[in-house]
Image (cartoon, grey):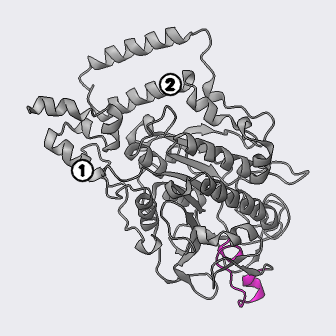
Amino acid sequence: MSRVDHCSQLHLSRKRLLQLGGIGAMGLTLPGLLHAEKNLGSGVPVKSCIFIHQYGGLSQLDSWDMKPNAPQEVRGPYKPIKTATPGFQICELMPRLAKLSEQYAVIRSMTHKQSDHKKANSMLLAGREQPAIDDPSFGAMVAKLRPSSASIPDHVWLQKFGGGAAPPDHTYLTGGRLGAAYAPMLIGEKHDDNPASAQFRVRAFDSPKDLSKEQLQNRLDLLKSAQRLSPVANSPEFESFEIHQQRSFDLLYGKEAKKAFDIEREGEKVRDRYGRNPLGQNLLLARRLIESGVRLVNVAAWTGLAAGEKFVSVETWDMHGNADVGIFENGWNGLPFALPRTDQAVATLLEDLKDRGLLDTTLVVLVGEFGRTPKISKGAKRIGRNHWPNCYSAMIAGAGIQGGSVYGESDKQAAYVKSNPVTLEDFTATLFAAMNINPASPLGLDGFTSPASTGNPIKALF
């Protein structure tokens, strides 16, 4: 068989080349191409991720890492309860997740040194303690390394960060140096632009005025022809722009994506199970998107407003006591309001994914940019806990993660790591590994440099 015949039998599509990390743009020879194909592994299942951001920073002491023997000003008012895992306890405000402990793992030794919201969020998004200004987010990297084969976005972001603590848009709403093709599709520009609102509508599918489908297709074809005459036609920048154009057209006129985003197709009982609040309905939408082929969905854990409250910010978990709601008060910025709603929504998500056979191939991540101070203090208006990056907790589930496990240990006041510290690099490398993506996958323009993560996966969690 000739080399040409062998090449024709490979049937390597453009999508497959992208799954191999952009090697088409590198101009590799056939042996190099086959080597890359072998490394990917034909029997390795492709996995997806729902990444839930507890924007503002959840208190580890009032959730996953309680210290009932600490002084009152440290331990707070809540009691720990037993979970389905012997010896593992969590906060009484999370009874449903307590029953599902065999489905997730908790890391109690997350740590870094940055207590500023904007900077810490940028670090979490990039998975690096020293991110560059053009570093792509975790979602953008996943979209690049494991693009979806469906006619649907690879990467979707539900509920935009808002308020003074928000990181810059470029850290998560663009593809960074990877290009616009790997930016997320944003749903939820404003706090009330979510599926819990009666006025919610996905506007991304609105067609341009005064332009028919045929006219847009003709323009797209003409632009592609002109691009191919350009000397940069084989560059990564061209690849990114071309994918971005085609995806935009497919979204406007395809049917798959519109169905996936139509949460009204869900029954009332299912919607009630998740909770009729922004987080509950966004997680239900996230499940629909994953089921339809979206590779990664980021969800800001905005749990909504209590009755009679006016909107302040989507920073639900920034519980200083500065927003006229104390950390232990029943309002939008208090644990008695936010944590039970999160318990309901996340527990339902885990149950739903498992019932649909999706939990083994869907990674679920629940984490904030840092934790809260061990000592309770008086904020500007109410009692709260301040920023604390030295030691905090994260929950991860599905995609081969060992359920019913606790990794790492904090000291007696959950102030500092006692054993097995987990850096942002190691945390992100663990997420990549759970998704069957090599953390060392090169993302530099030369195809050899800039690994997706410089960390080491936590083997004990698998």
Q: Disc 2 on helix, strand or loop? A: helix
Quadrant containing the N terminus is: top left
Q: Secondary structure at mark 1?
A: helix
In the picture, measured across the screen, residue 135 lies left or right of residue 20, that is right
Q: Which residues are magenta?
A: 59-76
The x and y percentages for residue 313 are: 74, 51
Residue at coordinates 33% horizontally, 38% vertically from top-left? 16
Q: Quadrant of residue 227?
A: top left
Give the amino acid at mark 2. Answer: Asp
Q: Please name the residue that numbered disc 1 is placed on.
A: 38
Q: Is residue 294 left or right of residue 53?
A: left
Given residues 42 and 419, the one toward you in this image is: 42
- For mark 2, what is the residue? 250
Residue lying at 41% horizontally and 62% vertically, measured from the top left? 429
171 in relation to 381, above or below: above
How much space separates mark 1 and mark 2, taking CA atoms? 31 Å
Report which quarter residue 225 is drawn in: top left
Nearest to the eye among marks 1 and 2: give it: 1
The percent coordinates of residue 343 (x first, y second) are: 72, 63
